[in-house]
């Protein structure tokens, strides 16, 4: 895992998330109009809130789409958590001339869910896997 550096805006956003949800955020990444918070397994319930109330408060305050992802030490579980609830059939590592990648096997019907609107979900996933596991890319197989 590389050293994580957050700017003052990121730190303020994390503090706001923690204040509104009561959950401790390990990290945060953004892509266009989306914010993704990484939390530990113990804090997932707080982060989501009853019937999604905590996430909704954060979404309304930031006026952005919000993802909350459960952190995992294992790269395969981490990738599954990022794309939850998509049906991930297989997660494996591969190497190329540009570095190590993660290959995700999914049913064709799940491509839209994994990629996200405008590619937002896959962009966030790429940032997270590079930051935590030094993997360069995500390759989708159907």
Image (spheres, rainbow, N blue to C red):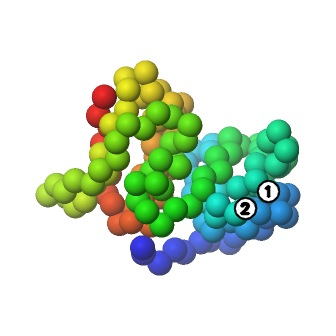
Q: Position of residue 79 (x, y in %)?
A: 45, 51
Q: Is residue 95 left or right of residue 110?
A: left
Q: Are marks 2 and 1 in contact (CB under 8 Å)?
A: yes
Which residue occupies 27% across, 54% down? 93
Quadrant of the frame with the C terminus: top left
Q: Is residue 28 left or right of residue 80?
A: right
Q: Is residue 26 visible?
A: yes
Instruction: Give neighbour class at mark 2: few <14, some 14-19, many 20+ (Cα, 10 Å).
Output: some
User: Which residue is nearer to you in this view: 36 or 108?
Assistant: 108
Q: At numbered mark 1, what does the secondary structure look like: helix, strand or loop?
A: helix
Q: Quadrant of residue 96?
A: bottom left
Quadrant of the frame with the N terminus: bottom left
Q: At numbered mark 2, what does the secondary structure look like: helix, strand or loop?
A: helix
Q: Give the spatial CA distance, label 2 vs label 1.
A: 5 Å
Per the image, the residue denoted by label 1 is: 46
Which residue occupies 85% across, 44% down? 50
Q: Position of residue 128 (x, y in %)?
A: 47, 58
User: Which residue is nearer to you in this view: 106 or 140?
Assistant: 106
Which residue occupies 47% across, 78% down? 3
Q: Tag on residue 72?
A: none
Q: Position of residue 85 (x, y in %)?
A: 56, 37
Q: Tag on residue 43?
A: 2
User: Which residue is nearer to you in this view: 135 or 83?
Assistant: 83
Q: Quadrant of residue 71?
A: bottom right
Q: Position of residue 29 (x, y in %)?
A: 57, 57
């Amino acid at each position: 895992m590389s050293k994580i550096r957050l700017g003052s805006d990121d730190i303020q956003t994390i503090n706001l998330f923690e204040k509104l949800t009561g959950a401790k955020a390990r990290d945060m990444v953004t892509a266009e109009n989306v914010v993704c918070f990484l939390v530990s397994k113990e804090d997932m319930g707080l982060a989501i809130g009853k019937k999604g109330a905590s996430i909704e408060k954060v979404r309304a305050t930031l006026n952005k789409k919000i993802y909350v992802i459960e952190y995992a030490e294992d790269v395969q579980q981490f990738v599954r958590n990022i794309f939850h609830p998509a049906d991930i059939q297989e997660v494996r590592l591969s190497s190329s001339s540009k570095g190590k990648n993660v290959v995700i096997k999914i049913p064709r019907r799940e491509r839209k869910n994994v990629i996200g609107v405008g590619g937002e979900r896959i962009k966030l996933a790429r940032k997270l896997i590079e930051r935590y596991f030094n993997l360069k890319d995500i390759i989708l197989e159907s």
